[in-house]
C-alpha cells in the first residue's frame, strides 16, 4: 500500500548512458512523427516515467496507464495519482503524488539575462527583494524564483509561461505561491541539489517529501 501523503521525486541523469526503457507502440508511433531531437527526448522521458511508476506500483512499465502526448499535460487515471516532469540539458526530473503536483529543474550555471526576466515576469515586491543582491547572486536568486514559478504553472495544469508566470507571486520565505488573478495559494519547495535547482509545487500541507533517487 502506497501512503497517500507522500511525494516521490526521481532524477534521471542524461549522461550518455542510453539504456533503453520500455514505451508503448502508440508512443513509438508518436515519436516517429517528431523531429530527431524531440523524438529522442520524448522516448527518453516517457520511458523513464514508465520505469519509475512501474517500480512504484509494482507493475510492468507497459501496463502503466500513462497518457503523455507531446506538449500536453501528462495524465494518469485518478487512482494512480498525478505525474509531472521537467528536464534541463543533462537531467530529467519526475514528480509523483496522489495529490496535484508540479516540478521544475534548471542547471544553476544557466546563462540568461536575469534583469530582463525579473523586469517582465516578476512583481514589484519580488524585484525589490532581488535588488539587494550583487550581480551573480542576483542571477541565482532570479533563477530560483523562475523554477518555483514554473513548478506552480505545472501544478496549475491549464496555465502557460506567457499567460501565468507574471501572475504567480512567490512569498519571501519561498514556501508559498499565490496566483494573483485566480486567487490560488499553494505550497512550494526549493531544493539545491548538486548543480541543479529543483522546485516543487503541491497543494497539501501535510505532504511528506520522501527522497530524490538517481536512476542511471
Image: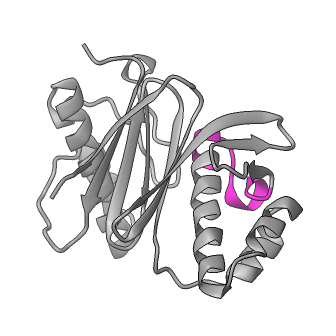
Q: Quadrant of residue 88?
A: bottom left
Is there any visible trace of residue 35 in the rendered image? Answer: no
Which residue is drawn at the image coordinates 60% and 83% (left, top)? 112
Of all residues, the one furthest to the top in this rendering is 1
Q: Which residues are magenta?
A: 153-166
Counting the numbered discs, the total is 0
Q: Is residue 214 left or right of residue 106?
A: left
Which residue is drawn at the image coordinates 73% and 57% (left, top)? 165
Which residue is drawn at the image coordinates 22% and 25% (left, top)? 57
Q: Is residue 139 left or right of residue 54?
A: right
Q: Quadrant of residue 140?
A: bottom right
Residue 64 location (% of width, % of height): 26, 31
Q: Quadrant of the C terminus?
A: bottom left
Q: Is residue 38 above or below residue 110?
A: above
Is 162 inside the magenta-drawn segment?
yes
In the depicted view, which residue is nearer to us: 156 or 211? 211
Q: Is residue 18 above or below residue 51?
A: below
In the depicted view, which residue is nearer to us: 188 or 134? 134
State the colouring used for the structure image.
Answer: one colour
Residue 83 location (% of width, % of height): 42, 37
In the depicted view, which residue is nearer to us: 120 or 128? 128
Q: Is residue 24 above or below residue 214?
A: above
Is 160 inside the magenta-drawn segment?
yes
Q: Quadrant of the N terminus?
A: top left
Residue 76 location (% of width, % of height): 41, 29
Is there any visible trace of residue 192 in the rendered image? Answer: yes
Which residue is drawn at the image coordinates 52% and 36% (left, top)? 101
Amino acid at each position: 500500500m502506497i501512503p497517500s501523503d507522500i511525494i516521490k521525486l526521481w532524477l534521471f541523469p542524461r549522461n550518455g548512458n542510453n539504456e533503453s526503457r520500455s514505451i508503448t507502440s502508440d508512443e513509438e508511433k508518436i515519436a516517429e512523427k517528431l523531429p530527431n531531437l524531440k523524438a529522442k527526448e520524448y522516448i527518453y522521458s516517457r520511458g523513464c516515467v514508465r520505469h519509475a511508476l512501474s517500480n512504484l506500483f509494482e507493475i510492468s512499465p507497459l501496463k502503466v496507464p500513462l497518457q503523455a502526448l507531446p506538449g500536453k499535460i501528462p495524465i494518469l487515471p485518478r487512482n494512480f495519482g498525478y505525474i509531472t516532469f521537467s528536464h534541463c540539458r543533462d537531467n530529467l526530473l519526475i514528480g509523483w503524488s496522489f495529490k496535484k503536483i508540479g516540478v521544475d529543474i534548471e542547471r544553476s550555471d544557466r546563462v540568461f539575462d536575469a534583469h530582463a526576466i525579473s523586469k517582465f515576469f516578476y512583481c514589484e515586491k519580488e524585484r525589490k527583494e532581488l535588488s539587494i543582491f550583487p550581480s551573480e547572486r542576483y542571477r541565482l536568486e532570479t533563477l530560483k524564483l523562475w523554477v518555483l514559478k514554473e513548478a506552480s504553472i505545472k501544478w496549475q495544469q491549464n496555465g502557460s509561461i506567457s499567460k501565468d508566470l507574471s501572475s504567480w507571486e512567490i512569498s519571501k520565505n519561498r514556501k508559498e505561491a499565490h496566483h494573483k488573478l485566480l486567487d490560488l495559494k499553494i505550497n512550494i519547495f526549493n531544493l539545491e541539489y548538486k548543480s541543479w535547482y529543483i522546485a516543487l509545487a503541491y497543494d497539501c500541507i501535510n505532504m511528506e517529501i520522501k527522497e530524490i533517487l538517481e536512476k542511471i
